[in-house]
Image (cartoon, rainbow, N blue to C red):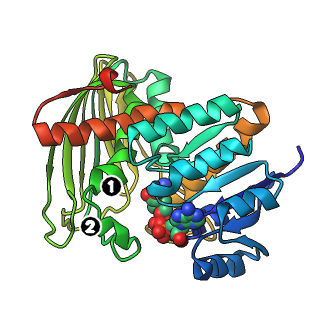
Amino acid sequence: MAELRGALIGCGFFAVNQMHAWRDIDSASIVAICDRDPERLKVLGDQFGIERRYTDAAALFAGESLDFVDIATTAPSHRSLVEMAAQNRVPAICQKPFAPTLADAKAMVKACSDAGVALMVHENFRWQSPIQAVRAVLDSGDIGTPFFGRISFRSAYDVFSGQPYLATGKRFIIEDLGIHSLDIARFLLGDVSTITTRTARINPNIAGEDVATMLMDHKSGATSVVDCSYATKLAAEPFPQTLVEIDGSDGTIRLEQDYRLTVTGRNGTAVSDVSPPLLPWASRPWHNIQESVVAIQKHWVACLASKTEPATSGADNLKTLALVEAAYAGAASGEPVQLDALL
Ligand code: NAD
């Protein structure tokens, strides 16, 4: 397969991981980068030796012949950039959160579908190897039919120093982190019919909620709890680990701190270490997320080659984004929210 030519738009905090991951993938490379901030463009361009640089996305599309674009900007710019990609018939990866509103996200999916170009949301948490290990146990049938799940992310890690915008938005943990946990719940237990949500703001120095607890009915009949917090001080800081509990008709799965996986199934109990590898460019504690960036980008390249829909396509991600919208609506009203009405 000829090497795919990609461009990256948005040279900020997280894009560095995506650039490292592209260097790890032989069949694709980033040939041009874009950021409206010339300083950020220069820093990333110099770090990765990319000479073709643009401060305007329209100029990037006009000036380059591209097989895909990797959009790593924050949500307010996603719709215009994805629609620009569709107009230029360039397949697009878009970072999460996919869009500020579900209406924007639906328009983005339609624009790419009408243009016949692939669209994948960079929803990478389900690609973390410990989460894939849990999925593999479910697929093995060892614990039977799941009836309960808990997807938990509780931490007091300072995410604000690297991503200062997280402290200023009216929405915080559900939109930024809970979105990943909700996607993992869908990945492990299937689509959701109803969600009930409670939120709190513990840190007085931020604008949004930093604690959220969500109870979900899955269409499969399973019930799950998705809980997340950036106000939880623990003896050993687990950031950025997602902990998972699943109970099934024939056994249980526990993904505990330090990537310890305990499976109790038909053949007894097995404990294994499912720690992600520390890639040469990665750094603890982010290595879990960094490895998943390589995995999702490899998946994108494979999907483009085989012309198949990515697991976290734009259309799929509407269901995750709808959970975010429903969680905020339910937190405000105190009532359960039906998902089908939003989709
Ligand atoms: P950031 O603010 O550090 O970087 C965003 C960059 O995009 C900035 O340099 C900005 O100048 C540029 N930009 C914005 N609009 C633009 C436009 N229209 N054209 C060109 N450049 C533009 O943000 P970040 O922390 O890197 O986050 C980026 C996205 O990645 C966010 O949506 C965030 O939620 C997401 N993120 C994902 C993960 C993950 O694990 N998937 C982790 C962290 C952040």
Tell me the kind of residue under disc 1. Answer: Gln
Which residue appears at 59% of the width and 83% of the height?
39
Viewport quadrant of the C terminus: top left
250 up-or-down from 171: above or below: above
Label at residue 162: none
- Residue 172: % across, % down: 28, 57
The residue lying at 78 percent from left, 37 percent from top is: 305
Disc 2 from disc 1: Cα separation: 9 Å
Mark 2 vs 1: CB contact within 8 A: yes
Taking the image as drawn, is residue 261 in sight? yes
142 or 3: nearer the eye?
3
Q: In front: 259, or 88?
A: 88
Residue at which label 2 appears: 236
Which residue is disc 1 drawn over? 257
- Where is residue 327? Give x, y as percent: 24, 39
What residue do we see at 67% from left, 42% from top? 86
| Pointer 1 local density, CA inside 10 Å: few below 14, some 14–19, many at least 20 | some
Give the residue at x 89% y 47%.
2
Q: Is residue 290 above or below residue 138?
A: below
